[in-house]
């Protein structure tokens, strides 16, 4: 609470406004931050958990599709890369994405960043995306500590 009063005091001294106006501005900013946090907690976390499940389903389907020829005995296990899937589904968008990234961020970002990322197997890429989204969207449990 002391920090809030110090912020109000310095704000008031900086812009020479009355006390009640600076208190109102600081409280309004605090409520906006609290509202954005509530929005993140109530909307973004469930959305991240949902995206985690969707990415996990895609990873499992891609893994089963890659394993099927090996389990049938018709071919060896060769995981398909994400770039191959993207190139088969929408080849022009893959080229357009490459050109856009090279133009906006430079060719090194594509060659050593995104270009390497999309050469990962599809099941591995979506599995990692699922794990990251699941960890970011997990529920936090409050720990109650009682001390006498």
Image (spheres, grey):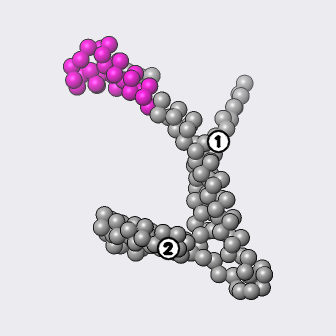
Q: Residues within 10 Å of mark 1 (few under 14, many from 20)?
A: few
User: Residue 51 location, x and y as percent?
Assistant: 59, 51
Q: Residue at x 68, y 35 (%)?
A: 143
Q: Residues within 10 Å of mark 2 (few under 14, many from 20)?
A: some
Residue 52 included in the magenta stretch of the image: no
Q: Nearer the viewer's eye, disc 2 or disc 1?
A: 2
Front-lying residue, 133 or 56: 56
Which element type, helix, strand or loop, lies under badge 1?
loop
User: Residue 106 location, x and y as percent?
Assistant: 31, 69
The residue where tag 2 is placed is: 87
Q: Residue at x 72, y 80 (%)?
A: 69
Which element type, helix, strand or loop, lies under badge 2?
helix
Q: Quadrant of residue 5?
A: top left
Q: Residue at x 45, y 22 (%)?
A: 1
Q: Is residue 109 visible?
A: no
Does residue 146 appear to the left or right of 113 in the view shown?
right
Majority secondary structure in the magenta region: helix
Q: Which mark is residue 92?
A: none
Q: Residue at x 31, y 63 (%)?
A: 104
Does residue 42 appear to the left or right of 100 in the view shown?
right
Q: Quadrant of residue 100?
A: bottom left
User: Residue 24 location, x and y as percent?
Assistant: 35, 18
Does residue 116 appear to the left or right of 135 in the view shown?
left
Residue 19 included in the magenta stretch of the image: yes
The residue where tag 1 is placed is: 139
């Amino acid at each position: 609470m002391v920090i809030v009063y110090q912020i109000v005091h310095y704000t008031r001294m900086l812009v020479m406004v009355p006390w009640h106006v600076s208190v109102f501005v600081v409280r309004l900013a605090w409520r906006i931050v609290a509202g954005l946090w509530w929005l993140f907690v109530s909307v973004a976390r469930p959305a991240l958990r949902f995206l985690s499940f969707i990415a996990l389903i895609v990873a499992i389907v891609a893994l089963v599709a890659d394993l099927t020829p090996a389990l049938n005995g018709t071919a060896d296990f060769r995981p398909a890369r994400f770039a191959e899937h993207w190139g088969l589904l929408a080849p022009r968008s893959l080229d357009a994405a490459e050109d856009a990234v090279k133009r906006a961020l430079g060719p090194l970002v594509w060659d050593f960043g995104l270009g390497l990322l999309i050469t990962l197997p599809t099941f591995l890429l979506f599995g990692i995306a699922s794990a990251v989204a699941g960890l970011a969207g997990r529920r936090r449990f409050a720990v109650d500590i009682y001390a006498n």
